[in-house]
């Protein structure tokens, strides 16, 4: 009985570090969302169409999807006041990180059709 416990303990001890490393989330798809001048767009939406997988860009315009299932996707970037942009046939494969940037142009209809865009002034102090 003691011998079986020792073998079981040895197996669990060796397997535990492997399980922990295997549980780390790796980026599958990363990139930036900017305007057409290259300025980062904060809180832009980036989605894998046909799924419920979506993220928002950070204050530097960066986004990342973690552990995306292997498949071919259409990736869409959107931001208020900008024309959405789709990238079709983006192939994601396990263990691979793809870098995909988006440069969104201003949506002239949003500005001309009566949409209200609110901005806050930068603190001058």
Image: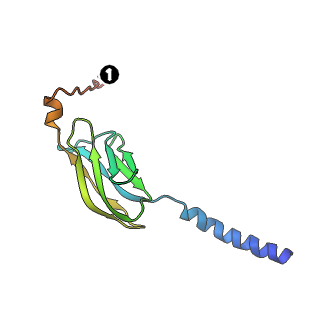
Using the image as rendered, state which of residue 78 and residue 103 is in the foreground: 78
What residue occupies the far right of the structure in this picture? 1
> Does residue 38 appear left or right of residue 52 in this picture?
left
Quadrant that contains the N terminus: bottom right
4 horizontally vs 120: left or right: right
What residue is shown at x 76% (from left), y 76% (from top)? 7
Displayed quadrant of residue 35: top left
Q: Position of residue 123 (x, y in %)?
A: 31, 23
Q: Residue at x 40, y 50 (%)?
A: 52
Relative to 29, is 42 above or below?
Answer: above
Q: Position of residue 3 (x, y in %)?
A: 83, 77
Q: Residue at x 33, y 48 (%)?
A: 46
The residue that disc 1 covers is 125
Q: Residue 64 appears at what percent x and percent y?
A: 38, 52
Q: Quadrant of residue 8?
A: bottom right
- In the orientation shown, which residue stands out farthest toward the top? 125
> Which quadrant: the C terminus?
top left
Q: Is residue 20 above or below residue 51?
A: below
Q: 82 or 27, which lies in front?
A: 82
Which is nearer the eye, 36 or 114? 114
């Amino acid at each position: 009985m003691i011998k079986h416990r020792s073998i079981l303990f040895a197996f669990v001890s060796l397997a535990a570090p492997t399980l922990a490393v295997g549980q780390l989330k790796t980026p599958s798809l990363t990139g930036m969302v900017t305007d057409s001048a290259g300025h980062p767009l904060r809180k832009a939406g980036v989605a894998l169409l046909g799924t419920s997988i979506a993220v928002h860009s950070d204050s530097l315009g960066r986004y990342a999807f973690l552990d995306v299932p292997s498949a071919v996707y259409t990736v869409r970037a959107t931001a208020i006041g900008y024309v959405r942009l789709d990238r079709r046939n983006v192939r994601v494969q396990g263990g691979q990180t793809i870098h995909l940037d988006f440069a969104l142009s201003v949506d002239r209809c949003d500005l001309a059709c009566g949409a209200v865009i609110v901005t806050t002034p930068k603190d001058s102090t």
